[in-house]
Amino acid sequence: MIQYSDGKPWPLGATIEGNGVNFSVFSPNATQVELLLFEHVHDVQPKVIALNPAHNKSYYYWHIYVPGLDKNQLYGYRVHGPYLPEKGFLFDASKVLVDPYAKAIVGEYDRKLAHQPFLDNLHSCLKSAVISDEFNWENDQYPYHELANSVVYEMHVKGFTQNPNSGVTEKLRGTYSGVIEKIPYLKSLGISAVELLPVYAFDTQDAFSGLTNYWGYSPINFFAVHAGYSQYLEPQRIVDEFKSMVKALHAAGIEVILDVVYNHSTENDAFNNGPTLSFRGFANNSYYLLDSKGRFRNFTGTGNTINSNHSVVRRMIQDSLNYWASVMRVDGFRFDLASVMSRDEEGVPLKNPPVLWAIDSSPLLSKTKIIAEPWDAGGLHQVNNFAGDRWVIWNDGFRDTIRKFVKGDAGQVGEVAKRILGSPNVLKARHVQFNPNQNLHFITCHDGFTMNDLVSYNNKHNFANAEGNRDGSNQNHSWNCGTEGPTENIEIENLRQRQIRNLYAILMLSHGTPMISMGDETRRTQFGNNNAYCQDNQISWMNWDLLDKNLPLFDFVSELIKYTIKHKTFSFPSYYMLEENDESPYVDFHGIRLNEPDWSFESRSIAYEINSNMDKERFFIIMNMYHESLKFELPNGEWNYVFDTEHGFKEASVYNEILCRDRSVILLRQSIE
């Protein structure tokens, strides 16, 4: 007979210690907790161990030590307690629960069954797995790229290689190992970091019937790596495959940034009818923001909101980040709907949110990149709550301004000038020392049109999402260049090519940290779908056939990235001054005539000169989004042609003036004697 011991409350989760495993979970109001041990993923007759509150509970924590267990042991919990929705208690011992601290989650479950209270789901439940943190990292080193030298590539792990035309070994398509096979491609593009859409275990069933939650913004817990992106079924090998991907990317000098979702979970029905998988079965009124009637508050647009400033939940978030940074060795995090994390337990924004300051000041996270999406679905949009010196901000204002400018909208030139200098009008409100590279600049991301679709569609085309085209943003600031969707018209195609180059040129020449979206460099299309969260198919996957078709665009983007990284003037860690300065670059704005910028409402062009005495170089940039060509005066001397967005990079010399064709960007360079 196995002799269990009391165990200990720390660490939380399932931890291998000696010849057994210590289990600990947080459940302050439970009356009884049962640990279920499964022999295999399809086991429906688990060994059940009832924890004795007199020996296996310390304050809010239930714990036990079970000898004879090791990695890959599958387990779950049943938790007994009151079912009083009006008080926020949703205990349901008929449901097998996933450990909130589980480091791997395997198996399949029936989401509809998990919705139904008091209906046993033992034959169709997810299972937690015991994982060893041991791994042979060999000589792995964090790349530690400075923001000034960073170009981020936002990508979906599965979608990057799932397409049969990816050239990836068939069994590795759509996996962490598949990413490894495509590292040479990432290197040739010149990016410094990949930003992975969610890889925390998520619920693929959280979508309309017949569709799949593809993006992954539906987490089950915050520690387990998503099993669906692995070639393996064994839990330990799943975790180790992710680590192997990180190790290989690091060896190539590429950082790994995770898109993390600490604002909601897949237990997401606002009327307390959502699936019971984990948090709500252990401590619903601790893990979630609830109103006075015990209902979920919804600041995320998904049905529930994580109570991130609750002391226990705040620690869980910190433990999760520490685990991914130290054990899984990732390099940074992009926080989805990060403004949610500034709300207190009543949903009111806090001036100094404890969880955000804890992340900013954590010594274990001190060398990671922390990036905030500074809004939520409840209307909170701010940068001031990310006032720590390290926070990088997703700058949606840059996105919208540049889209409108390149589209040809009037009234944008003054705002463009601010955006290309790092949005000082926005970020100076943070009242901290920061540099403009703490803007994460982007034109497109997973949410919205691809770059190709931004210049090919006036309207969204989301009917495949089964919501009658009601979903997705209507404010795309897009222009189809003359016809909706694909066309054989060569003039329209040439214009679209030039517009894409314009968007890339302005992105890379602006003062901030650029992010590009997977496949935009090859004109990946979603056929006008601007909310492809549920499209696990050719709509969302990378189409590798487009690389050969659009190789000139790929080459332009790659050369543009490498050029702007090489010339430090474009990423100097202080604001460009509007007067001559020997220590940092300074800027002079011009129009078609020198020193006469046109700030009028109807203006659609701007020229400016960046002078860097330190680097002994100056640049002259022309952005003409007018529908006609314009002639621009140049400062004295010989100017070397770098590129224009019609012909790409080329070598030539120009003097005194230059003709910039309609809807084009030109970059010139001059050495300073």
Image (cartoon, rainbow, N blue to C red):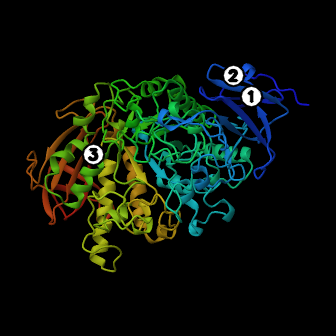
Q: Are marks 2 and 1 in contact (CB under 8 Å)?
A: yes
Q: Can residue 222 be seen in the rendering of this structure?
A: no
Residue for badge 3: 397
Q: Secondary structure at mark 2?
A: strand
Give the left or right position of residue 599, taking residue 94 as reference.
left
Task: Give whichever of 597, 247 is nearer the camera.
Answer: 247
Which quadrant is home to the N terminus? top right
- Rendering quarter of residue 397: top left
Most distant residue in the right direction: 1
- Rendering quarter of residue 471: bottom left
Q: Secondary structure at mark 1?
A: loop
Residue drawn at x 36%, y 23% as measured from the top left: 352
From the viewer's perspective, is residue 554 above or below residue 224?
A: below
Measured as percent of width and height from the top left, residue 13 is found at: 67, 32
Mark before the other along the chain sequence, 2 or 1: 1
Q: Amino acid at mark 2?
A: Lys
Number of disc labels: 3
Residue for badge 2: 57
Task: Give whichever of 533, 92 is nearer the camera.
Answer: 92
Measured as percent of width and height from the top left, residue 564 is found at: 36, 47
Residue for badge 1: 51
